[in-house]
Image (cartoon, rainbow, N blue to C red):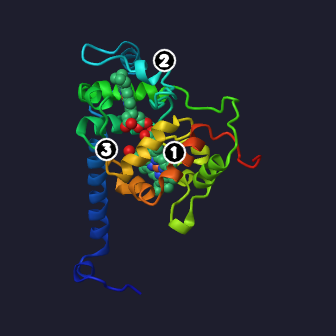
Amino acid sequence: MRTCRSLRLCASPATSWADSLRILATIVVIAWATMRAPPVHADRLAGAALAQKGSKAVPACMVCHGANGEGQTASGFPRLAGQPEAYLLKQLQAFAGGQRKNPQMAPIAGALDARQMRDAAEYYASLPGWQPHGQTPSASPQYELGRRLSTAGNWSKEVPACFACHGPGGAGVPPHFPALAGQPSAYTRRQMKAWQTAGRTNDPQGLMKSVAEKMTDAEFDAVSLYLENPSLDGKGK
Ligand code: HEC
Ligand code: HEC
């Protein structure tokens, strides 16, 4: 038996409702496709040239991010290689727009046009991401704490496991969740602190803010240490 929840629904014959729904669905699909269509196509080779040589306005990205986008552990410059393309593009836009603040990256991103941002994002996303390199980290209580937070979280404080969003092993889940594995610990720590103190405000629905706000500095240190080389399962302590 048909129940009428609204007068309009009862008054209209079923077929015309189906028709208008179908038309509406078509309009939505077309509108969505138009909005999603990228205005310019990314060019990986142009991205590679920008990374290796820079332009009149910006230095070569590799000076800081490494010859193959692998980052620099000692100076805390992040790895870009293998990160999701949409994530990289979003970060460049955030530096340019001020939702992410950094004295080195903000002026560089601000000097790139939309096309150069897409090219660079496509190029770095195409490079191989982090792999365990055989250098076993030394197990310590701090490393073990970092492993626990990453794989299981800390439910007494409602901190979810990092890998619940960032994927097993911290390998990332495209397009929105970046890889964490292999990032310099100084970099990861700086990002956690930035979310906690509202220096970085571009995370969707404040997801990272709500994680970082519940954590202590000691937990930031532990998780950052572990994520720099998460290749030990932590049981050999
Ligand atoms: C002078 C050094 C320097 C140069 C040159 C440089 N960067 Fe960066 N970049 C940084 C630093 C430092 C950060 C981390 C900023 C922070 O802590 O928030 C960063 C972060 C980024 C991020 C965010 C990464 C992430 O995981 O969220 C992207 C994307 C990026 N850079 C792209 C580029 C591109 C593309 C170029 C070349 C056009 C470039 N960078 C050149 C220093 C540099
Ligand atoms: C509920 C999902 C969620 C959980 C849980 C989570 N993250 Fe994130 N994280 C995100 C999202 C989404 C982003 C991307 C933010 C953006 O778009 O700028 C992110 C970004 C990051 C970044 C920036 C990476 C880069 O390259 O700049 C770091 C570092 C990070 N998270 C660390 C952690 C750590 C450490 C934990 C566990 C203590 C954690 N995250 C747990 C959703 C999550």
Residue sitting at x 27%, y 76%:
13
Pointer 1: what residue? 173
Pick whichever of labels 2 and 1 is earlier in the sequence.
2
The amino acid at mark 1 is Val
**Total of numbered circles in the picture?**
3
Q: Provide the secondary structure element on which disc 1 rests.
A: loop
* Residue 202 makes an appearance in the image: yes
Residue type marked 3: Ala
In this rendering, the answer to whether 10 lies above or below 66 is below
User: In the structure shown, which secondary structural element does the residue marked by tag 2 occupy?
Assistant: loop
Element under disc 3: helix
Which one is earlier in the sequence, the residue at label 3 or at label 2? Answer: 3
Q: CA distance from mark 2 to mark 1?
A: 24 Å
**Residue 179 percent location from the top left of the image:** 51, 40
User: The N terminus lies in which quarter of the figure?
Assistant: bottom left
Q: Amino acid at mark 2?
A: Ala
Residue 22 percent coordinates (x, y)? 31, 60
The residue at which mark 3 appears reads as 33
